[in-house]
């Protein structure tokens, strides 16, 4: 029997991110931009590296990305608990549970890296 463990990330204490109910449907975005933090993880999962990501998303710096990744690492060291709705959750590979809730910004395709023709 495989037991899935979830790690809930509390983005409110990450200085590289912000959220505003008036922008981006209150999603967590990189401070000063409209780039959702989920876009970082989507692109890293697709094989992008940090240099690519900051080139594709103006306004996001490598330091912002490092801060977010350090925040995630610290959060994972603190412990694992059941995820409340609305927070980004990470799961082990192979789990059948979705990694993140669907959001309208994903349907627009604006958070994935540009595809070359």
Image (cartoon, rainbow, N blue to C red):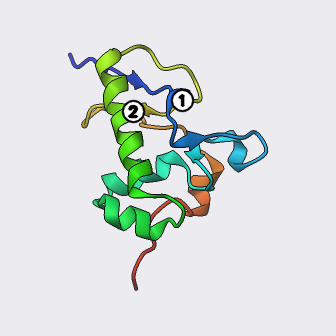
Q: Quadrant of the C terminus?
A: bottom left
Q: Nearer the viewer, mark 1 or mark 2?
A: 2
Q: Which residue is mark 2?
A: 71
Nearer-N-terminus badge (1/2): 2
* Label drawn at residue 63: none
The answer to whether 57 appears left or right of 21 in the picture is left
Query: Residue 86 at x, y = what percent?
Result: 59, 29
Query: Residue 106 at x, y = what percent?
Result: 56, 54
Quadrant of the rendered image containing residue 33 = bottom right
- Residue 24 vs 50, above or below: the answer is above
Query: Residue 69 at x, y = what percent?
Result: 35, 40
- Mark 1 falls on what kind of element? loop
Q: CA distance from mark 1 to mark 2?
A: 15 Å
Image point 58% across, 24% down: which residue?
A: 85
Image point 29% across, 60% down: which residue?
A: 49
Q: Which residue is mark 1?
A: 87
Residue sitting nearer the eye, 70 or 35: 70
Image point 32% across, 24% down: which residue?
A: 76
- Mark 2 falls on what kind of element? helix
In this rendering, does residue 81 appear at all?
yes
- Residue 72 vs 43, above or below: the answer is above
Residue sitting nearer the eye, 112 or 34: 34
Q: Are marks 1 and 2 in contact (CB under 8 Å)?
A: no
The answer to whether 63 appears left or right of 18 in the picture is left
């Amino acid at each position: 029997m495989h037991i899935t463990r979830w790690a809930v990330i509390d983005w409110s204490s990450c200085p590289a991110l912000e959220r505003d109910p008036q922008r981006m449907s209150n999603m967590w975005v990189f401070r000063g931009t409209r780039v959702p933090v989920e876009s970082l993880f989507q692109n890293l999962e697709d094989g992008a590296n940090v240099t690519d990501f900051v080139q594709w998303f103006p306004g996001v710096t490598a330091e912002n990305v490092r801060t977010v990744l350090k925040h995630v690492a610290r959060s994972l060291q603190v412990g694992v608990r059941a995820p409340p709705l609305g927070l980004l959750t990470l799961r082990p590979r192979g789990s059948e549970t979705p990694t993140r809730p669907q959001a309208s910004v994903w349907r627009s395709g604006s958070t994935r890296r540009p595809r070359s023709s």
